[in-house]
Amino acid sequence: MESHAEEIRIEHLQPGQLDALIDAQNEIFEDYIIRIRSSRQFFLDFMSSVGGNLQSVLMALDGDRIVGYINPVADRTEGWIGGIGIRREYRGRRIGTRLMNEAERELAAKGVREVSLEVIDGNTRAEELYRRLGYHPTRKYLTAEGIPSRFQGFGIEPMPATLPEVVSLHSRCYADTCWQRRKADAVVQSAKGSEMYKVDGGFVIVRNVETSGFILFLGVVLEKRRRGIGTSLAKFALSRLHDLGAFKTALYNVNEDEATMRMLDMFDFKVTMKQTEMRKSL
């Protein structure tokens, strides 16, 4: 028998329901623009990287079955929607609207004044929902991929960095970017299994997994930009990943601005995905 929207309950995730949530996520995102496969560890690592907690996750339940979820995250007066999804056969029943409304209500109760989220370009259904709820676009972020190469000379030779040094530099380099990039939790999580390097006024974090390389962070403090430091760090990172055996390298959630586009062109990186950041005042 088909369930009516009013029969769907909105409840918080309970400790014993995490595996069921992961299974629901994997089914929800089977037909997504970019197919996402989650796991318990992946989800826990993601929550750590964005400053979230499992107790804040809201589920839409049809009986005992998880048919949708939303992951609201609060940091003082800022809030962020770190994921929302509905099972295919339950879409079009305003369950997403109910989850968004409840998430905003709980964020406001925690003192949040503004909420942000990202939507992948081409996901028109989600973007239309957010616009109806009062969100407006603010800027775009890019994901790009390229091939690492060995460069001769970097201009400035980076040195190994400690986590406290990188966290300090990050706070000065990433103030004006998306939630997942500007929060210190993301740096701490990214440092696990990665290599960290610093120069005067900048830093870079790289990781190689089998033959895939990742430049997780590359930042230059505001007062030292336009001096070639970012280019030097990029050359070093691509050379290091080349030496580690990476066949390709990815950058995630970088700002779509003139300086970033010049650097992507310089190293022949191709944009593989765009996301629009949207915001709403509560």
Image (cartoon, rainbow, N blue to C red):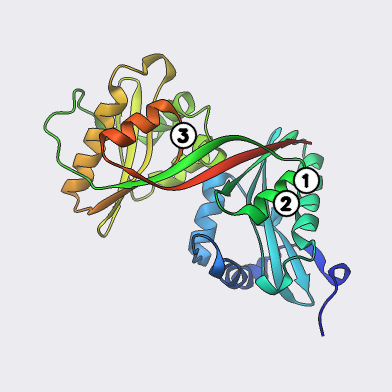
**Residue on which the image places disc 2:** 129
Which element type, helix, strand or loop, lies under badge 1? loop
Three-letter amino acid code at disc 3? Glu
Which residue lies at the image location 18% right of the left edge and 43% below the top edge? 149
Q: Residues within 10 Å of mark 1 (few under 14, many from 20)?
A: few
Task: Give the image location of residue 139, x and y in percent.
Answer: 56, 34
| Quadrant holding the C terminus | top right
Give the number of marks.
3
Q: Seen in the image, is 1 located left or right of residue 24?
A: right
**Residue on which the image places disc 3:** 256
Asked if the residue under mark 2 is in contact with the one under mark 1, i.e. CB atoms within 8 Å, the reply is: yes
Which residue lies at the image location 19% right of the left edge and 40% below the top edge? 239
Q: Disc 3 and disc 2: Cα gap in Å?
A: 24 Å
Three-letter amino acid code at disc 1? Leu
Which residue lies at the image location 30% right of the left edge and 35% below the top edge? 265
**Residue on which the image places disc 1:** 133
The answer to whether residue 219 is visible is no
